[in-house]
Amino acid sequence: MRGGVGAAAVIALAVSSTASLAVPAYDIAFVSEFADACVPGRLGYQTTRDAARAAGWTEVEPGVNAEFAGIMARSEAEAAADPELPTVFEYTTYAKAIEGIAHYLVVSRSAITVTEGEDPWVMIGCYLYNFDAVAPIDPEPVTALIGNPIAQSQIDMHITSYVWGPPCPMPRTGDTYLTFIPEVSQYREQVGISGLVLKFSTSEPDPGEVVPDTYC
């Protein structure tokens, strides 16, 4: 899947053909916004930024939301934490209302030097946050987008988390994570936020490398 055009319609159609109960409109909208911003340009940092802007996201400073500022500060600290793995970490942050609720998007590029003198390992990340979420969403729209069944899950009073393996229609993209952390969660202090997040990362191809449209 190179593009995210018509993601809402595609996801809704796939969900309607597989789900036994109606999936809430917000759940489909949340995943569709992720698809439109994160899928089309996922192989590169600038191309993902371009896709986010094309999908209606507006660049903002992380400080527009306290939890957003906190998670980005943690990300910067983690990138600089291991001197044996020098990392160049850059990112762009965005905001957009989905169903009338403020949401935040991060597009990142991490260039990690594993062996001195060799080219770095480069990952493009895309993360969608709803810090005001009070309940998890149905995972079915993500299953429809990724094209894989859920590989792992954890559901209890502290966290609702799902993981999907690398999507066959999206070469070079790794696992996809959908996580909800309630305000009462024991993990809130550890991760620094509560709410909903959907994310994946993609390994950046070498210059001139030809990436197939699909592995399917």
Image (cartoon, rainbow, N blue to C red):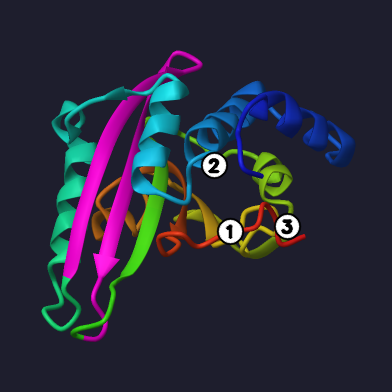
Amino acid residing under circle 3: Asn
Cα–Cα span, label 2 and label 3:
16 Å
Q: Which mark is residue 211?
A: 1
Decide: is 142 above or below 113.
Answer: above
Look at the image and say whether residue 94 sits in the magenta stretch. yes
> Regarding mark 2 in the picture, which secondary structure is present there?
loop
Decide: is 148 above or below 16.
Answer: below
Q: Quadrant of residue 107?
A: top left
Q: Considering the image in quadrants, where does the C terminus appear?
A: bottom right
> Regarding mark 1 in the picture, which secondary structure is present there?
loop
Q: In this picture, which residue range is highlighted in magenta?
A: 87-115
Look at the image and say whether residue 214 sits in the magenta stretch. no
Mark nearer the viewer, 2 or 3: 2
Q: Residues within 10 Å of mark 1 (few under 14, many from 20)?
A: few
Task: Pinpoint residue 165: horizontal percent, then vertical percent.
Answer: 63, 65
Query: Mark 3–mark 1 contact, CB under 8 Å?
Result: no
Q: Which residue is mark 2?
A: 39
Amino acid residing under circle 2: Val
Task: Pinpoint residue 194: horizontal percent, then vertical percent.
Answer: 34, 44
Task: Residue lying at the far top in this picture: please name it.
Answer: 100
The structure residue drawn at horizontal position 47% and vertical position 58%, both measured from the top left corner, is 202
Q: Which mark is residue 148?
A: 3
Q: Considering the image in quadrants, where does the N terminus appear?
A: top right
